[in-house]
Amino acid sequence: MKIILKALLFSTLFLFSAAANAQDDGDGGTSEKKAEEKKFQEVVLMDSMPASEILKRAVNFIKIESPRFAKTKGVTTGNKAECIAKFKIKPKELNPKPDYTGFITMHVSIECKDNRYRYVISKLTHTSASGKASGGDINNVVPACGSMVMPDLIWKRIKGDAFKNANMVVSELKEAMMRSVDTAGDEW
C-alpha cells in the first residue's frame, strides 16, 4: 500500500512539474530570438534658439536630397519631423551564396524644443530585393529568413553595415542642424 501511495505521489508531482514547464511565454508561441533593441538617440543642445527655428532646420534636413541615401515619407507634426532613410546594400562577392541585395531602412525622428532637439533612429530593417534572403529587424539574433538561408557571418556583416549607415545619417543630421535655413531666397 505504501509503495502504491509513493508511486502515485511521485507521478502526480512529475506530471505537475512537466505541465508547469510546458507553459508558453504569452506571445502565442511565435517568439523569435531577439536581442535588446538598438536605437541611436541623443539630445543636442543649441545656443538660445527657439523651437520654431530648430523645427525649420529639421524640416530642411528631411527635404534636401542626400547623395548617400534616400529619404521618403517625410512628415511634420507639431514639434516633430520624421522620415524613413533608405540605403542600398549589395554583397561585395561576385557570386554570393545568399543574394541579400536589397535595402536597409530606418525610421528617423527629430523632436524640437527651445534650445535643444532630440533625434531617434530606430526600426532598422533589412529587406532583400528577391525576398528570399530578407533579414528583417536588425535587432534579431537570427534573421527572419532563417539561419539556413543566411549564415551568421553574413547576418553580422549586414548588421554592421546598418549601424554604419545609421551613423552616417546621424552625421548628416547634425551637420544640417548647424546650418541656418535660408528663407530670404524664396521671396520674389
Image (cartoon, helix red, strand yellow):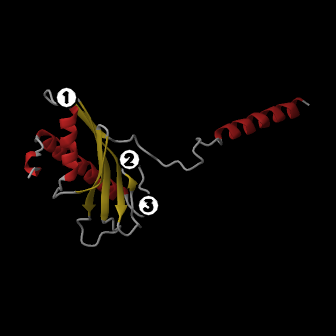
Tell whether label 2 touches label 3 (CB within 8 Å).
no
Q: Which residue is mark 2?
A: 139
- Comparing 61 with 69, the one in front is 61
Q: Residue at image x 32%, y 41%?
A: 39
* N-term mark: 3 or 2: 2
For the residue marked with disc 2, what is the amino acid? Asn
Q: Residue at x 44, y 61 (%)?
A: 145
Query: What is the CA distance from the residue labelled 2 to the residue labelled 1?
Result: 33 Å
Q: Residue at coordinates 44% horizontally, 57% vertically from top-left?
A: 144
Identify the residue under disc 3: 145
State the separation of the CA atoms marked 3 and 2: 14 Å
Element at label 3: loop
Residue tagged 1 = 115
Residue 146 seen anywhere in this rendered image of the structure: yes
Q: Is residue 76 left or right of residue 10?
A: left
14 and 96: which one is in front?
96
Tell me whether circle 3 and circle 1 mark residues in contact (CB < 8 Å): no
**Looking at the rendered structure, which numbered label has been put on residue 151?**
none
Q: Residue furthest right?
A: 1
SS category of the residue bearing label 1: loop
Q: Secondary structure at mark 2?
A: loop
Whole-angstrom CA distance, mark 3 to mark 1, is 44 Å
Q: Nearer the viewer, mark 2 or mark 1?
A: 1
Residue 33 locus on image (x, y percent): 46, 47
Observer-nearest residue: 51 or 10?
A: 51
**Front residue (pair 2, 132):** 132
Where is residue 117? Give x, y as percent: 23, 34
3 vs 1, front mark: 1
Q: Is residue 44 visible?
A: no
